[in-house]
Image (cartoon, rainbow, N blue to C red):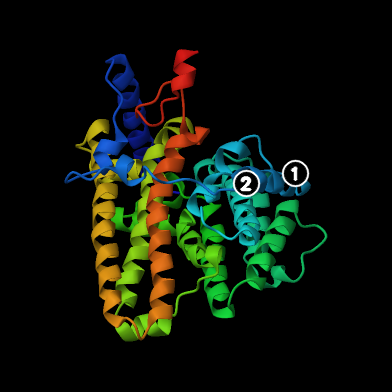
Amino acid sequence: MSKSYRSKSLSVLKKIESQYAMHFEGMNSPICLHDLFCRNGFSLREYCKSFRPHLHSRQIYQAVEKFGQQYNIWLKSAPDYITCHLYLFPNAHLYRMMPLLKNCAVDFYLNDEYGREVYHRLPARKKLEAKEITSRICDPSSLLSIPKTAFKVEYANQEMMNEIKLASPEGWFQKFLYLYNLHVEIAHANCETSLTGVIPTIQEYIDSRCDISGMKHTVLLIEYAEGQFLNWKWLEETGIANNLRRLQYLIAAIGCLSNDLFSFEKEVIKNHSDSNLVAIMAHHHPEMGLKELLISSAAMVGDDIAEFLSLVEEVRNYSYQFLPAHQQNIDVLEHYLNGLERFVQASWVWQVSTQRYKSKRSIFEETTDRQAVMA
């Protein structure tokens, strides 16, 4: 690997870490992500005011904990992440909620054990494990059989995927399987510019991050959660399809890029990873200081939120033109649009509420652990 890439990556990280330390030495106030994400009088807090996670969260949590322990994938940090899908799918049918939570349990386990932010620091044995596990999970035949030498997480994944397959149309499941396997393949490998020898453009990073984050296949699960599957033939015929694809992309980008801000300290400062929007921005804008980088990165999330809010209403209002003849398709589309809106709400509420990104001393208001500060 070229020393120049390794040197540049280290230089970028050192500069960020140095300015991060200086932020606290200067007794600067924490930065408010909410204010950076909002514009033109819009308030995420108001938008999310009526949001609530799944009504049966406690019972579902207890059931998925047993699943995680059965397959030895229940990490110490599990209570901080397993609630994610309870927020993303608050109206999911109860019998569909367990496969959704199992998906969350498997995915976060793989992320925390072998994911992009820790992969570069793993010993050779763990890297080999990651390759073995991901190669078998990404093989469609694993839905039918797994070798006896397989890891327990592979059996957990097989159980989860087969449950989802049994309760969904074949065409939808094949698309879900493709996006899920793509996510597993690229998210649990080296993503550091110092080792790949590639510094992606900002747009290339965003496009890749949408796959790495798993947001694309997670957005598909909106249909699965309530058993309301979109009629794409009708969407194409009515001219709605392209705008809906854009909405799906925006939702994925809002989720993964806002997470790059919330997990900035965990990924960049603690794990010294430059696979993060802020670090990629620093590669391309060496003239920017840390605060400027954070503001510019958050502005990209704000732009996506603003476009989403406008486009979702445009799609909703346009679809009403096809009433009453296409009532059933419009009802399914309305369910889906509501699900997309809940995704935006959940992305904010969950990341603010979970302890996963909190610390006693944080550069952001939202990730400062108030209880730890007062203790």
Vertical comparison of 335 with 122: above or below: below
Q: Which residue is painted at 65% across and 34% down in the image? A: 76
Q: Does residue 2 lie above or below 288 as drawn?
A: below
Q: Where is residue 240 in the image (x, y as percent from the top left)?
A: 31, 77
Q: Quadrant of residue 102?
A: bottom right
Q: Measure how far apart labels 1 and 2 are at the Cα level.
A: 12 Å
Crowd band around label 2 with a 10 angstrom C-alpha radius: few (<14), some (14–19), many (20+)? many
Q: Residue 13 carries which label?
A: none
Q: Mark 2 points at which residue?
A: 109
Where does residue 153 sit, x and y in percent of width and height?
70, 53
User: Can you tell which quarter of the image residue 164 is in?
Assistant: bottom right
**Front label number (1 vs 2):** 1
Question: What amino acid is labelled 2 in the image?
Answer: Tyr
Residue 184, how many percent across, how many down? 56, 58
Whether residue 297 sits left or right of residue 276 in the image: it is left
Q: Can residue 294 be seen in this view?
A: no
Residue type, numbered disc 1? Gln
Image-based side of 321 in relation to 223, left or right: left
Q: Do the residues labelled 1 and 2 touch (CB within 8 Å)?
A: no
Task: Determine crowd level at label 1: few under 14, some 14-19, many 20+ residues with C-alpha closer than 10 A.
Answer: few
Report the residue marked by disc 1: 69
Residue 321 visible in this rendered orientation of the protein = yes
Name the residue: 55% across, 59% down.
92
Q: In this view, does 344 lie to the left or right of 357?
A: left
Of pointers 1 and 2, the one earlier in the residue sequence = 1
Q: Which is more toward the observer, 294 or 332? A: 332
Label 1 sits on a secondary structure element that is helix
Q: In the rendering, at what x and y percent does residue 77 appear?
A: 61, 36
Question: What number of labels is visible?
Answer: 2
Instruction: Identify the secondary structure beneath mark 2.
Output: helix
